[in-house]
Amino acid sequence: MSSSARKTSPSARKKKNIAVVVGVALAAGLLGFASYTATKPEEPSVATAEKGDSAASSGSSGSSGGSSAAPRKGAYPELEALARRDAEDPLAQGKADAPVVMIEYADFKCGFCGKFARDTEPDLVKKYVEDGTLRIEWRNFPIFGEDSERAARGAWAAGRQGRFWQFHEAAYADGAKDKGFGEGRLKELARAAGVKDVERFAEDADSGAARDAVKKDQEEGYKLGAASTPSFLVNGQPIAGAQPDAVFERAIEAAAAASPSSPDSPSSPSSGEGSGK
């Protein structure tokens, strides 16, 4: 090996170390997406899991002050930190401080995304978003070409006028994706979604800001190792695909029980005294 190959500047070594750390975190996320399937054995109840974790930690060097619940199997702190919790985000629904955040990476051209949007998501909204347990944050993750990109920008533009979720519903209606997402079709969807200023919508959808916003979400998904749509994170726990309702319900309920901010969490000061809001 040449001498020049051996000599590495301090800044180069620092960059390499950072890259290694980032690589490990991304590998963890990729493993999570690859390993979580519908045929996964059912996890034990939260109470059983916490009892087992407590017994295991009693023989180890646990230095926790008891302020947080037991870690959930398959959940990654690095991924949980991706929740933006922006109260002004038009591409999200549910309280910004909800104990559980489900991030959804999806494409409007994806048939399975449409199935989830029609068959599963409305029940999750009714059961968990409306009672303050769950927040859903959408990430545009177009992977099927220019039509997908246009639809993603259109959804973002509808959000600029407070009609993202209405556009989402119209774009995922049964058979909607078969009509494509050309410029004229996007305007039709905008009207169906109740967007008031359709011309402004069209300008927003074709803007650099729309492209930047979609690119930001898209790059986040790729960095996670998400290779298909839909993909989800439930408080850092990856779920791949439009799984049965029970898969999401188990994940949400386990995350809620483990969250320090949940009224049902042992570490919550208001345990048993829900605010009712």
Image (cartoon, rainbow, N blue to C red):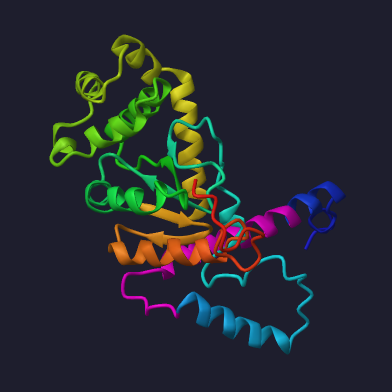
Q: Left or right: 270 with respect to 174?
A: right
In the rendered image, the residue lying farthest to the front is 273
Percent position of residue 261, x then y:
60, 56
Percent position of residue 220, x then y:
51, 44
Percent position of residue 15, x then y:
75, 50
Percent position of residue 88, x then y:
52, 30
Q: Left or right: 63 with respect to 101?
A: right
Point 57% across, 55% down: residue = 80
Q: Is residue 80 visible?
A: yes
Point 57% across, 78% down: residue = 50
Taking the magenta stretch, the answer to whether it contains residue 248 is no
Q: Nearer the viewer, residue 222 or 132?
A: 132
Q: Left or right: 68 with respect to 14?
A: left
The span picked out in magenta is 17-44
Q: Nearer the viewer, residue 75 or 196?
A: 196
Taking the magenta stretch, the answer to whether it contains residue 25 is yes
Q: Is residue 146 visible?
A: no
Point 72% across, 65% down: residue = 67
Most common secondary structure along the magenta stretch: helix
Quadrant in the picture for the N terminus:
bottom right
Residue 226 picture quarter: bottom left
Q: Nearer the viewer, residue 4 or 218?
A: 218
Residue 44 picture quarter: bottom left
Number of on-image labels: 0
Q: Is residue 34 shown above or below 85?
A: below
